[in-house]
Image: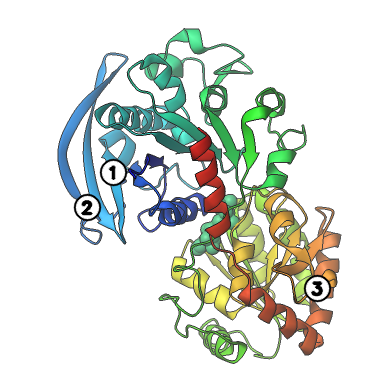
């Protein structure tokens, strides 16, 4: 039987370029689907990608994209990486930047143009080869379903996944001309959004199916509280919206196989070697004290304000706290000011994959007080690395973390500590619960060992995507 063909498109894919969970998903979901589909993954060839390391070669195909009387030259590149075929779209304006989307203080002003080049590049790929399905991810790919309205020869079905509704790709009306989109699409049913143009609306309007990355988030974004101004629009397209929870890659995020760890581990005695080494390296004292970690982008979404408001009270206890993140400078300054006064808090303002793995492997608890969370991967990584997550009961956190008081050793559920209200008091209350749990070693170990055996892989969710593709 011939397999259906699938083009998976994302603006970041691990290990080539990553700023967050989208890159992890774009790496691991195609791997979980590759046996069932003729599959290719497409992304921009940012200049920060190491072409030599991944043997990325020119495909000797180029074309130009004409927009607003300007020709943008595009060249296609490709490579095979761990059995998956990648296509890279290279164009100077899209790719030759220091960062993917912008500096730590603001997005690049020409992002609409940059990612329209990406979208038009994807359409070229769909024109050159027949694909049954194109799976688009987030606003950077969201113009594709609109562009396909003008392509009567292309019959590819479209699936659009919302990884985070907070980033919709909103630009001024004037941008429409720059990116050569007909003003007939500037209506309330498609692109128009409070007088501006909204990329994500185009995908919601024209995709054959829309998914988001957990069932709870799929429900939440239909409400004004979480809908980021699109809840009404989403409600009117509700019949094609479903939630499919993300998984984590079982090669990359399994502690016994993790190549980034000094001591890959299968049990808590081995895990402790990582903790010992990490504490020593970061000059933190006390192997028997619980180690709490926070890893994430410094944005309000991740509950960084709650963390900052609680930090001193937490640090007064017999514990260590380690924070790794990058993003908004204001948060960096506030945390640094506190950290300077406590020798049991360690803080690094950077993005570092190896360090993050080392931290998951060393930690006893993960702090994840996100105000909203479409799915969240950190909590699943933490649970499989033997760290109990402390999370705000929202979105994907609610779907993947179960309250430890309901622990059932026969279940396949993973357990952590949840709090209902996004308040620093609630976080501190849960932190104290964590201290109490840690002091009853037996209960703590029981939960950690159970979590480490739970299945966080893509096995189930890949089946749901497979089913959805088949329905299309
Ligand atoms: P996001 O909203 O950022 O996509 P997710 O929880 O879905 O959040 O995924 C975050 C991913 O990025 C995880 O793999 C996490 O370990 C990683 N990560 C976040 N910040 C950092 C950092 N500063 N250094 C290394 N890895 C990070």
Element at badge 2? Answer: loop
Q: Is there any visible trace of residue 317 in the rendered image?
A: no
**Closer to us: mark 2 or mark 3?**
3
Per the rendering, the mark at residue 88 is 1
| Residue 182 left/right relative to 274 | left
Provide residue 423's location: percent of width, then percent of height. Answer: 83, 55
Mark 2 highlights which residue?
56
Provide residue 439's location: percent of width, then percent of height. Answer: 80, 87
**Closer to us: mark 1 or mark 3?**
3
Q: Nearer the viewer, residue 93 or 185?
A: 185
Residue most extreme to the front: 1
At label 1, counting other C-alpha atoms closer than 10 Å, the crowd grade (few under 14, some 14-19, many 20 or more) is many
Q: What residue do we see at 61% from left, 58% from top? A: 333
Q: Nearer the viewer, residue 271 or 109?
A: 271
Provide residue 72's location: percent of width, then percent of height. Answer: 25, 26
Q: What residue do we see at 63% from left, 34% from top? A: 241
Element at badge 1? Answer: strand
Find out whether the residues at labels 2 and 3 contact each other: C-beta distance under 8 Å. Answer: no
| Residue 260 left/right relative to 321 | left
| Residue 302 left/right relative to 407 | left
Q: Give the alpha-carbon distance from disc 1 to disc 3, as whole Å.
A: 46 Å
Q: Nearer the viewer, residue 402 or 152?
A: 152
Mark 3 highlights which residue?
407
């Amino acid at each position: 039987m011939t397999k259906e063909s699938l083009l998976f498109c994302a603006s970041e894919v691990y290990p080539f370029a990553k700023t967050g969970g989208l890159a992890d998903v774009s790496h691991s979901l195609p791997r979980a689907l590759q046996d069932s589909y003729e599959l290719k993954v497409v992304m921009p060839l940012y200049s920060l990608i190491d072409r030599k390391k991944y043997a990325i070669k020119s495909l000797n195909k180029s074309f130009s994209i004409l927009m607003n009387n300007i020709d943008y030259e595009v060249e296609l590149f490709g490579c095979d990486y761990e059995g998956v075929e990648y296509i890279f779209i290279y164009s100077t304006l899209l790719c030759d930047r220091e960062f993917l989307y912008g500096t730590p203080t603001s997005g690049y002003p020409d992002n609409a143009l940059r990612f329209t080049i990406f979208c038009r590049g994807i359409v070229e790929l769909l024109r050159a080869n027949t694909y049954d399905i194109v799976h688009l991810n987030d606003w950077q790919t969201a113009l594709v379903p609109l562009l396909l309205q003008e392509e009567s020869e292309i019959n590819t079905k479209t699936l659009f996944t919302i990884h985070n509704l907070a980033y919709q790709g909103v630009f001024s009306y004037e941008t429409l001309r720059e990116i050569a989109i007909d003003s007939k699409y500037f209506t309330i049913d498609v692109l128009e959004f409070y007088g501006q143009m909204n990329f994500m609306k185009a995908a919601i309007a024209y995709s054959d199916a829309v998914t988001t990355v957990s069932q709870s988030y799929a429900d939440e974004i239909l409400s004004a509280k979480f809908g980021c101004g699109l809840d009404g629009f989403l409600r009117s397209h509700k019949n094609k919206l479903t939630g499919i929870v993300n998984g984590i890659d079982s090669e990359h995020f399994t502690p016994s196989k993790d190549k980034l760890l000094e001591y890959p581990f299968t049990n808590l005695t081995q895990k402790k070697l990582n903790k010992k080494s990490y504490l020593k390296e970061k000059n933190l004292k006390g192997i028997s004290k619980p180690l709490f970690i926070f890893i994430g982008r410094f944005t309000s979404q991740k509950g960084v304000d709650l963390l900052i408001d609680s930090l001193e009270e937490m640090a007064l206890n017999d514990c260590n706290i380690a924070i790794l993140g990058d993003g908004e400078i204001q948060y960096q300054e506030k945390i640094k000011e506190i950290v300077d006064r406590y020798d049991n808090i360690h803080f690094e303002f950077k993005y570092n994959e190896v360090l993050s793995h080392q931290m998951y492997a060393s930690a006893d608890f993960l702090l994840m007080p996100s105000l909203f969370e479409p799915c969240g991967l950190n909590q699943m990584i933490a649970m499989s690395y033997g760290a109990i997550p402390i999370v705000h009961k929202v979105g994907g956190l609610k779907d993947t973390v179960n309250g430890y008081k309901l622990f059932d050793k026969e279940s396949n559920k993973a357990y952590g500590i949840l709090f209902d209200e996004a308040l620093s008091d609630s976080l501190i209350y849960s932190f104290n619960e964590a201290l109490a749990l840690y002091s009853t070693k037996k209960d703590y170990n029981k939960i950690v060992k159970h979590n480490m055996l739970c299945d966080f892989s893509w096995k189930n969710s890949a089946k749901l995507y497979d089913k959805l593709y088949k329905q299309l």
